[in-house]
Image: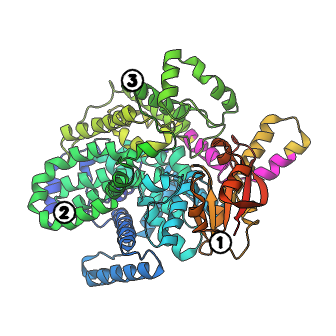
Amino acid sequence: MNGEPQSAANEIAGSTSPPGPLRGWLFRSRAGSATGAPGSLGHPPDALFLRLVRGWIWLSALAGLAGWSLSALGQLNRTGYACFFAAVAGILLAYRRRWDWGAPNWGKFLRRFRRPLPGAFAGLAALVFLGSCWYAPSNYTGLNYHLGRVLQWLAHGQWWWIHTPVNRMNFAGCAFEWLTTPVVLFTHSDRALFLVNFLPFLLLPGLIFSVFTRLGVRRRVAWHWMWLLPTGYNILLQAGSIGNDGFSVTYALAAIDFACRAWESRRLRDAWLSLLAVALMTGTKPVSLPLLLPWVILMLPLWPWLRRHWLATLPVAALAGLISFLPIALMNELHCGDWLARNIEIIPRVIHQPATGVLGNAIQLLVGNFAPPVFPAAGWWNQHAATFLPHSLAAALNTDFDGPVCYVGELPTEDYTGLGFGVSLLLLVSVLGAIWAGGNAPKTPVHGPIPGWLCRGVQIAVWMALLTYSLKSGMCTAARLVAPYYLLLLPLLLTGAGHSQIIRRGWWRVLAGGVLGLALVVLGLSPDRPLWPAKTILSRVVAQHPGQAAVARALEVYTIYSKRNDALAGVRALLPPDLKTVGFIGDGDDCDISLWRPFGRRQVEHFLVTDPPALLRSKVDYVVVGGWNLSVNQLSLDRWLRWNGARLVATTNVTVKIVEGPQAWYVTRLKP
């Protein structure tokens, strides 16, 4: 794991000489830099990496444009998408001379992966891909509302405010869903949806290197971390998932990257791409809104230049507004009177004291990033962790947050983990080691195209954005939710001169190897997509040693996760096979995906337990009712049947969540 070759680092940043006057301006401004600083790299527009990032941003933007425009026309269907694709293809053909279609140097590209760090990243990426091809998607929030809302939109031919207790179907951003909508529409399957996460995951090393070097991190340091940071547990696990936390990391990095490139090149294209990327970031999750601060700090000095080109920028700005969180914010304000829809969340929490918000989120980030990757004592910890806190603080956290802030699992999962133990520990050791080694490190300044004061302002602004999030958010899954923040937080910690010294040390390389080894363990043991015959082996161990409670729980976890993609298959089997529409009454966290299968043959209508019988009768004959939802609403099945004039057809028990255990599900039919 020695230092990176010059050619590999240059290729990742896209470093062949720029043409014409731009080349002279760039290299004159960086003459004399001999430290491998970000300023010593050329950044032309025709590198393979840049073409891929630009292509992904434009694909994402066009997917959002297609979704909203076809929804406005009521044509969110195959015909509508076919017409949209044809129009885009026509535009590409009309402007084909302006596109660089040159073939990349694939040999040079592949040779990079002969080295240990790139090779390890490629190996982990290959395992993610294979696991995602083998297993159906099982991310619960992805099934509960990402995929669920897409099926609702396609059934109605447009985006609409869905009548459902699953409020996230309505108030959440749509950038992820607009990319998955045509995949579901044309394949009638969810098996390929992981590609929406996997493809941008492959772009992360290049984006990390490009952003880090432009923000003052030395090139050699950035080269090592560019391969290690994507192995953070949340990013790695969601690379093969249908969750959307790691999905927005690419947009967050690209927004800063192209804003920096606009500083260098003064090309409108770079500014436009930065604008589209930051819009897509906010359009994915509103928790990313504070990250607008560092982006504004970068782009604000360029405003006079952009204003001179306002006419050309106006259509791009309009597209950015359409694919951002703005349309959903307007719909939230229209339908529930709050642009963030906080008043209709399942468990709304308001931070009453700023200190409580900061401490609560800090505890979550600490636990979510430093918990051991294999933690058999997680149950004991979750029962007793709150007792280690002062009573007043524990009471305040319980009031302001929607769940326990100290929760950890036996294994890292997509629902709770952050970068994870390996990367976090290496980062902590590296920062401490760099401080110790900084006195002996050469103090050669790092020269780059971005002024030093601006780099430092952007670095600090990211931490201020995280502080803003902490002051406002009472959600108990912060380690997962702040995924777009993590990689932008690190340039401030990695700019010290000592970092270029410690990455040469043997102990650091051993620790880096340990980070990759732990990432492999986490990926292999993941309950969502285990890379070993978990149920087979654990079943045999339980049969031979029936008294082992830990093994029995592990078997239960892997079994439940393996059924998540079609958890209510037993309920679906109780429905008439030719039924076209079925009602569904569950709580805000129940998942109806099984009732849609096979996609395209049946429609699911959501109802509330309080809905009048006339509303149900106007739309459906059969209604599936969740027993957990009835108990939460203190309503018996007999009372609900009498109220709606229905009869019980069949009953079955299903375990969707281990914490809830087996729950009753009822198939009912409304009487004529």
Q: Nearer the viewer, residue 626 or 221?
A: 626
Query: Which secondary structure class fits the magenta region best?
Result: helix
Label 3 crowd (10 A; few <14 / some 14-19 / many >=20): some
Label 1 crowd (10 A; few <14 / some 14-19 / many >=20): few
Residue 531 appears in view: no
| Residue 596 to residue 200: above or below | below
Q: What amino acid type is highlighted by mark number 3?
A: Ala
Disc 3: which residue: 355
Q: Earlier in the sequence, mark 1 or mark 2?
A: 2
**Magenta-span inclusion, residue 520:** yes
Q: What amino acid type is highlighted by mark number 1?
A: Pro
The residue sitting at 28% across, 37% down in the picture is 461
The C terminus: image quadrant = bottom right
> Is the Cβ of the residue at disc 1 closer than 8 Å to that at disc 2?
no
Instruction: Classify residue 43 by image quadrant.
Output: bottom left
Label 2 crowd (10 A; few <14 / some 14-19 / many >=20): some
**Magenta-span inclusion, residue 539:** yes
Q: Earlier in the sequence, mark 3 or mark 2?
A: 2
Per the rendering, the mark at residue 268 is 2
Disc 1: which residue: 598
Secondary-structure class at tag 3: helix
How far from the left and from the top, in percent, is residue 268?
Answer: 19, 63
Magenta residues span: 514-540
How far from the left and from the top, in percent, is residue 260?
Answer: 24, 51
Q: Tell how many labels.
A: 3
